[in-house]
Image (spheres, helix red, strand yellow):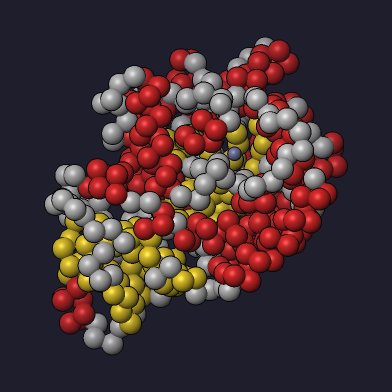
Amino acid sequence: MLLIGNGLLITREPARPVWLAGCVAVQENKIVEVGSTEELQGKYPDASFVDAQGRLIMPGLINTHMHCYSSFARGMDLKSQSPHEFNEILTRLWWRLDKTLTMDDVYFSAAVAMIDCIKNGTTTIFDHHASPNCVPGSLFRMAEAAQELGLRTCLCYEVSDRDGDEVAQQGIDENVDYISKCKRDHDAMRCGLFGLHASFTLNDALLRRSADIASMLGVGCHIHTAEALSDVEDCQSKYGKRVVERLKDFGVLRPATIAAHCVHVNEREIEMLREKAPFVVHNPESNMGNAVGCAPVLEMVRRGIRVGMGTDGYTSDMFESLKVANLLHKHQQQDAAAAWAEPHDMLFEQNADFASTAFGETLGRLVPGALADIIVVDYNPPTPLTAANLNGHVLFGMTGRSVATTIINGRVVMQERKILVADEQEVFGRARELAEKMWKRF
Ligand SMILES: [Zn+2]
């Protein structure tokens, strides 16, 4: 038994969103009780105690669109002119980088990204992986890193036709092998989706085959959807339809599917998204950084579409993404009243609901029966913090680096900023060595 207490407990649950001197009781990997510290310490006197020392106790954060393989791009010299638009970003950076990855690179780029997630209070990620020159076994290598570090992961391999039939088939096989293993293992620490790159790198035959296999396996897909205008133009010129319509026609858009981005969707496509109900994931920083536009996610939310939040590998800090989402839509709409509520709903409610369905267990909530993913956040409110003004404190007062302690599945993986599950210096040192070698091959 583990108690995390003596803190301002933020559950966001309607019945009692905030507890002063609150406490969470954890038995093995699940939360068994939420109450006052005094009461739970009295009831469980022999339990280990994580003392929040008056700081905040919150649910662990969830990132529903991530690319761990992008870790080694940090600080890399592209050795060519800076890309101006999305296709140049892919051809000059990501599609060159992913081809240079070896299996060790896959492991260590994942490990440093996962440690970064833990340090930013993210306890579950939905990753979208590519390493065309070492596909078979790549998800299993990432899963090893996740298991050692104790991070909850949903992995997939992005199938595409950009590297020919053989690599495409390897991508399909890797998804099938990994998903099958997850289904056999029934381990709440991991699951899989069927990864697809994007409409413009999936010919009809490949998309048909992949969508059918995903359906047969009973899992959703994880696909970049109308991220850039060029994806739409490609789809219209090759298939005479827009991206969302094409994905709908192939049966890809289902409630278990992640449709990442959805930047360039028109009114008709928004209606299709509402009807087919895939989980749309908003990645505000990536969209701004890649200069692809602003996804009409506020309109989607108004229409009842489920929209969550991811980072697309741009950062591991969900607090940062929350902040950027708040600013992006104000700026885009020239309306200072816009986007006060929606980003919080995406991060805390929608991501938790989608992850709970994907993993088959309650996630992202501090309630009895939920998996014990809990963070302690070093934030001392300079003004009164109440259930009514909580979002303002989260938005303006917290960053990922405020996270002091991270608990995943009942295991303390970081305590007072120290990673307990690995030698952080050693992992980062090894990653730097591998990154330097990879840069030379790039
Ligand atoms: Zn992405």
Residue 140 visible within the image:
no
Residue 393's spot in the image, x, y percent? 25, 47
**Residue visible at 60% across and 47% down?**
67
**Residue visible at 26% across and 56% down?**
11
**Residue visible at 24% across and 43% down?**
392
Q: In this view, does 95 lie to the left or right of 341?
A: right
Asked if 418 appears above or below 211 in the picture, the reply is below
Locate residue 238: give its quadrant: top right
Asked if 293 appears above or below 173 in the picture, the reply is above
Q: Quadrant of ligand 1?
A: top right
Residue 397's spot in the image, x, y percent? 29, 49
**Residue visible at 69% across and 18% down?**
234
Residue 402's spot in the image, x, y percent? 36, 58
Give the quadrant of the N terminus.
Answer: bottom left
Q: In this view, does 34 lie to the left or right of 245?
A: left
Locate residue 197: give its quadrant: top right
Locate residue 148: give its quadrant: bottom right
Q: How many labels does the image show?
A: 0
- Toward the bottom, the furthest residue is 46
The one nearer the camera, 375 or 252, is 375
Q: Is residue 389 left or right of residue 121?
A: left
The one nearer the camera, 43 or 395, is 395
Give the quadrant of the C terminus.
Answer: top right
Q: In this view, does 334 lie to the left or right of 237?
A: left
Asked if 308 appears above or below 37 in the picture, the reply is above
Residue 316's spot in the image, x, y percent? 50, 50
Residue 434 visible within the image:
yes
